[in-house]
Amino acid sequence: MADLRRLIARKVIYLVITLFAIATLNFIMFHLLPGEPGTVLLPGRAPKEAIEQLRIYLGLDRPLWYQYWIYMKHVVTLDLGESWYWKGTVINTIMPRLQNTLIFVGIGTFFAIVIGTYAGMLAGARRGKPSDILLTGTGLFFYSIPAFWMGMILLLIFAVQGSLAWFPLKGSYDVGLTNPSLSQIIVDRLYHLFLPVLTFVITAYAEFALIMRNSLTDAFTEDYIQTARAKGLSDRNVLRHHAVPNAMLPTVANTAMYVGYIVTGAIQIEVVFSWDGIGRLTWDALQKRDFPVLQGIFLILA
């Protein structure tokens, strides 16, 4: 029992140190950004007096150590402050966008895993054959395409005026809907989600496919596969009941790494499609030098 208490205490101490380090780096990183928030927040070419008054109002005229003290006090009390540009609390600014991104990335990751795992399974089961070469080559080709470029290609094909312009050019919902029903809201959201999700899946599925293929190739060399074949099991049963379950473990582990895609790939896709998510908010906050929102985003994601 004493060992368990020491272990828990050590883990708690490590957690506190980690959170403190994240919060500190979060503060330093954005205060090192070039540019003056006043020149962005104030309209036109504002006079120096107005910029200085805004600095005083935002507390940017105070010593850096004092700003850090106020920031850490807010972090400890879970008060992330007020947005400089969106004129509301940071939490209220972030949460609706975070929800949109989780829906977008969640659906995209689900289909990327399903398609990638199945493609990797087919390639691994037929390694060295034309189908393996075709699936692997196609996956590597799409994996090498930047997400923003793929998004622009899909926009040109399926959103710009033409015979295939079936989907909206931008946005996460139709602003023209008046008093929509729940079914209309769902259909409208899915309609606006299709191209961003398709972009995500095309550029992300190959990673899962390649991991599954390599894991399956390694699994076929293991002794338990040879034992299963020696028992007289068909190749189909060996694949489904012995090779695939063990080859799935690296794929499951890789899924957790896609949390980071919320900030990296999602920024590119959300900016291209004007999807109102956390990635687009990060980009806009960087442009507006809205430090409280940027700090809140990275603190929540970290």
Image (cartoon, helix red, strand yellow):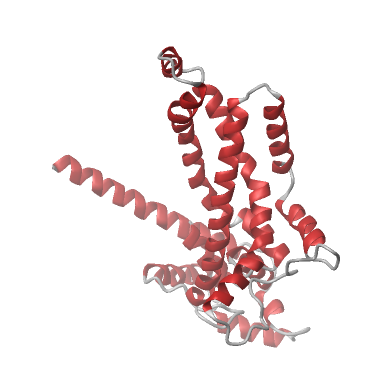
Indicate whether 101 appears above or below 222.
below
Q: Quadrant of residue 163?
A: bottom right
Residue 275: % across, % down? 65, 67
Q: Quadrant of residue 263?
A: bottom right
Indicate whether 89 appears above or below 31.
below
In the image, taking residue 123 as reference, residue 273 lies left or right, namely: right
In the image, taking residue 136 as reference, residue 124 lies left or right, namely: left
Indicate whether 281 appears above or below 210.
below
Residue 253: % across, % down? 47, 40
Question: Which is more toward the observer, 168 or 51?
Answer: 168
Residue 4: % across, % down? 19, 43
Question: Which is more toward the observer, 217 or 125?
Answer: 125
Residue 207: % across, % down? 61, 40
Q: Residue furthest top?
A: 230
Q: Residue at coordinates 72% horizontally, 33% vertically from top-left?
A: 137
Q: Residue at coordinates 54% horizontally, 75% vertically from top-left?
A: 183
The quadrant of the rendering that contains the N terminus is top left
Question: Which is more toward the observer, 83 or 33?
Answer: 83
Q: How many marks?
A: 0
Q: Quadrant of residue 30?
A: bottom right
Q: Residue furthest right?
A: 162
Indicate whether 210 appears above or below 61.
above
